[in-house]
Image (cartoon, grey):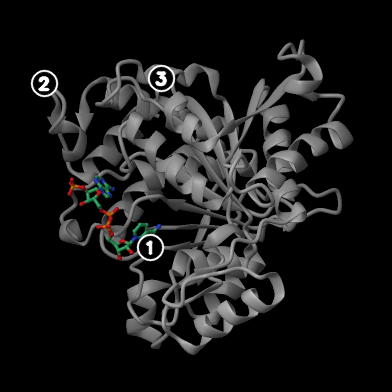
Amino acid sequence: MAEKITMQSDGTLSVPDEPIIPFIEGDGIGIDIWPAARSVLDAAAAKYGKKIEWKEVLAGEKAFNETGDWLPEDTIMDFREYLIGIKGPLTTPIGGGFRSLNVAIRQILDLYVCLRPVRWFQGVPSPVKAPHLVDMVIFRENTEDIYSGLEVEAGTPEAAKMIEILHDAFGWEIRDDAGIGIKPISKFGSQRLQRAAIEYAVRRDRKRIHWVHKGNIMKFTEGAFQKWGYELVREEYSDVAVGWNDCGGDAGDKILVQDAIADIALQQVLTRPAEFEIIATMNLNGDFLSDALAAQVGGIGIAPGANINYATGHGVFEATHGTAPKYAGQDKVNPSSLLLSGVLMFEHLGWQGAADDIVGAVESTIGEKIVTYDFARQMDGATEVKCSEFASALIDRL
Ligand code: NAP
C-alpha cells in the first residue's frame, strides 16, 4: 500500500517501498518530457520491487487555467506533507505576482541547496576538447544573495527613501536615478550550504571542495562566505576535512577545502576541470557556473537539478531548462534533464541501484547514438528518435 515518505528523529528519511510522490507535469514541453521520464523511472524502480504512487499537483499554466491561481496553496501543502516531489519546467507568469514560480517554491519550502551535478555522457556533443574531465557537483545557495528580491526601482519614492536613509546613516553617496538591490549573505545561510557540501563529499568519497566567491571585492558578503566556510571546516569537520591554509595543500586522506575567486573559477573549470569536484557558492555565482558547466557537457537538455532542505527533508527535483514552448506537444525534445533529476531523487531516497541502472541505460543509449534532435543535429551517424522513443530505448537497456 502506498505511504508517505517521512523524516525520522535522526534526520534521515524513512522511505517505504511504495512512496507517494507529488509531481508537477510542467508547462510547454512538460507534456512530452514528463510521461517519458516517468516511464523510465517506473521501469527502473520496478526492477527493485519499488512502486511510486505519483500524485499530480498543479502549478503554472495548468494550475492557472483550472484554479485561477499560478501556485495553488494545495500544491505547497502537498510538497510539505509528502516531503519529496518532482517538477517539469514552468512558465514564469508576467505580472502574475511572482518573480518566478520556481523561486517561489524554493523560498516557501526554504530549499536552501540547489544541487547541480555536471558530468559528461560518452558521445554527447560538447564544445570542449576533454568533456570527460568534467565531473563536478555544484552546491548553489538558494535563498540569499541579490536573488532574495529585496530591490527598489529607480525613480520611485522607495528608491528615493533608500538613498536618503543610506546617505543619512552611512554617508553613502548614491546617484538619484539609481535602482538598488540588497545582497544579504548570512553566516547561518552560508554554513548550512557549506555543511551540506562537506557531508555530500564525505558520503560520496569526494576529496576536493572549492568555496567560490568574489570576496576580494565584496568583502563582507562573499568574503564572509569564504571565511565562514573555513571556520566551519576547523570547528565541525576537522576529523574529515582540512582547509588549504591549514595543510599547505596536502590534505592526506582528508577532504581538501580551498577557495577560488569566481572569475578565475569560471576560467579554471574550463581549462583545468579535473581539479574541481565539489563547488559551493552563493546564488548568483552558482547560477552562472551551473549553466556554463552544463554547456561543457552537452547543454541544458541533459543537466539535472534538485532543490533540497536537508534539515526538514524537503526536496523538489526539477529539469533545469525552461518550457521551450515552440516544441510543446511535438514529442521531440530531450527528456534527460527531467529524467536525471529523477535519478537524483532516487539517490536521495537511497534507491541507488535503480539510479545506477538509469545512468547505465543513458550511457549505452547515447553511446549507440540513439538520441533526440538536439544531440542528433551535432552528431555524425546518429539515429534521431522522438522523446517517447528515447524513453523506450532507455527502458530496453535498463
Ligand atoms: P528554454 O525553455 O530552456 O528553451 C531554450 C532552448 O533550449 C530551446 O529553444 C531549445 O533549444 C533548448 N531546450 C530546452 N529544453 C530542451 C530539451 N528538453 N531538449 C532539447 N533542447 C531543449 O528557455 P526560454 O525559451 O528562455 O524560456 C521559456 C520559458 O521557460 C519562459 O517562460 C521561462 O521563464 C521558463 N523557464 C522555466 C524554467 C524552470 O521552470 N525551471 C527555467 C528556465 C526558463 P533549440 O531551440 O536550440 O532547439
Does 234 sit left or right of 268 as displayed? right
Q: Residue 237 occupies which quadrant of the picture?
A: top right
| Vertical position of residue 38 compared to residue 152: above or below | above
Between 237 and 60, the one nearer to me in the picture: 237
Q: Position of residue 262 (x, y in %)?
A: 52, 37
Residue 46 appears in view: no
Q: For the residues carrying marks 1 and 3, which lies nearer the camera in this image?
A: 3
Q: Under tag 2, what secondary structure?
A: loop
| Vertical position of residue 136 compared to residue 300: above or below | above
Spatial CA span between label 1 and label 3: 38 Å
Q: Amino acid at mark 3?
A: Thr
Mark earlier in primary sequence (1, 2): 1
The structure residue drawn at horizontal position 30% and vertical position 40%, both measured from the top left corner, is 391
Between 168 and 78, the one nearer to me in the picture: 168
Q: Position of residue 340 (x, y in %)?
A: 43, 40
Residue 316 appears in view: yes
Would you say the beta carbon of the disc 2 residue lies within 8 angstroms of ligand 1?
no
Spatial CA span between label 1 and label 2: 33 Å
| Vertical position of residue 352 compared to residue 179: above or below | above
Q: Which residue is mark 2?
A: 381
Q: Which residue is mark 3?
A: 271
For the C terminus, the image quarter is top left
The number of numbered badges drawn on the structure is 3
Q: Which residue is mark 1?
A: 25
Q: Amino acid at mark 2?
A: Gly
Mark earlier in primary sequence (2, 3): 3
Between 282 and 325, the one nearer to me in the picture: 282
